[in-house]
Image (tube, helix red, strand yellow):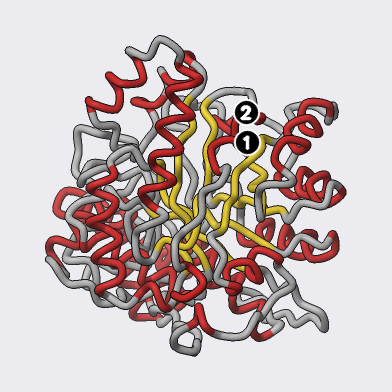
Amino acid sequence: MRKIKSLLYRTAARGEAFLKGVAFDCRACGQCVLSQTGLICPMSCPKGLRNGPCGGTLGDRCEVYPDRACVWMRIYERTAKDSTEVPPLNPSPDAALFFTSSYANWWKGIDEGGTTPLPYPDLPKNRVYQPIATRSRLEAALKSGRFVKTCEVRSPRSADFGRLHKEISYVKEQFDAVNATAYLNGKPSLPSGRTCIELLSAGVDPICQSTCRDHTKTSFVSELINNHANGVHNVLCLTGDSYAGNPRIKQVFDMDSSLMVFEARHLRDTGTIHFTGQTMPEPPKPFIGVAINPFTRPIHAPIRRLKQKIAAGADFAQTQLIFNLPAFEQFMIRFCDEGLDRELFVLAGIPVVISKPAMEMIPHIPGVDYPDEIRKRLEGAANLREEGIKLAREMVGAVSKMQGVRGVHLMLFGADHSVLPEVVRDIDAPGSAERT
């Protein structure tokens, strides 16, 4: 009898997967949310994201398959159109239910953990004005009203810290915090958290970057615990670029960045790991950052996505690279009109292009809006280093005057970090302290 029942379940699952695959591009997760997503399967997103578009979406195109519309942009168009309401926070699917019948799982009541939206934490309003809640020096700087400056260094791909210490020596005096990037382009390196220790030893407030592409929930929370033990109090929660086309690398995507924020905030505020229920007496209390792409269109899509991350518990955001200033200004006007400047600190992502090989990579970076006039200006420069610094200074000056921008995050296209202090030299936001 048990064998017959098992055969019936398998037959039902395969039949359901076939029919729903034809009709809805179903991926047979066994915990269907089609009724919430306009009959478009979110698992058909190449990253399997359950809560909105990733930062690689440019316009309304998919990062992995640019010839196709982003799955989540299609979902938004069908379910929300131009709404900017906070969307529900869908949980990660239960991997144990994959390739089973969602109808059978619903009937047995075992799919709720993967279909019932998570409750957002009860957070105070006007959060940028709330008292300091963490030991992050970046939080203290932002809440002081100063115009904040951050940049990034790359984790070494060996145990040799020589290059890293040289880079740190250039930026430690001028910048309030420094991101430690890791695993760029799928290449192994020291973890971000290990590089953060080197930054700390030099007196720099580090930002540990964590990507859903590379983390399970277990490894992410473990990284938060490790950071806490080492005195690292900032985390940047990223979806992560796709490694499409490299079959040797398995991408994780156990969660998306909104769920990563939710896990970090739940642990910080309650002392409990949400997905296990485990409590700890001295939990990590990170200052939580996210990324946002202001150039996803229509404009309500990044606003809606950012609202979700704010509701999940984000404290600050670093933006995608800004080459298109008018489009970024349009985004910031909408950001402030929605009142989000009272809930989240925004650091504008400023490119510093000083290397020709690095410049040639820009058109291939997912999610980057690279206008022809900027491309021609850089490609035609007699001295790319000087022109790159000049352009970056112009952009820092422009964004510093925009309401809602509380600082800049410099991203270097080249190997000489000595140029970064020159970009931010003598630049501050007029009246920034008064806005706080």
Q: Is residue 165 above or below residue 138?
A: above
Secondary element under disc 1, as helix, strand or loop, is: loop
Rendered image quadrant of residue 192: top right
Q: Is residue 12 left or right of residue 272?
A: left
Q: Kindly identify which numbered label has been placed on residue 427.
A: none
- State the image coordinates of residue 84 (x, y, percent, origin top left): 23, 72
The answer to whether residue 93 is seen in the rendering is no
Q: Kindly identify which numbered label has been placed on residue 187.
A: 2
Residue at the image position 67 percent from the left and 47 percent from the top: 174
Q: Is residue 119 above or below residue 331?
A: below
Q: Quadrant of the N terminus?
A: bottom left
Q: Are marks 1 and 2 in contact (CB under 8 Å)?
A: yes
Q: Is residue 204 above or below residue 389?
A: below
Q: Residues within 10 Å of mark 2 (few under 14, many from 20)?
A: few
Judging by the rendered image, the residue that carries numbered circle 1 is 183
Residue at the image position 42 percent from the left and 55 percent from the top: 400
Type of residue at label 1? Tyr
The answer to whether residue 38 is seen in the rendering is yes
Q: Is residue 249 left or right of residue 93?
A: right
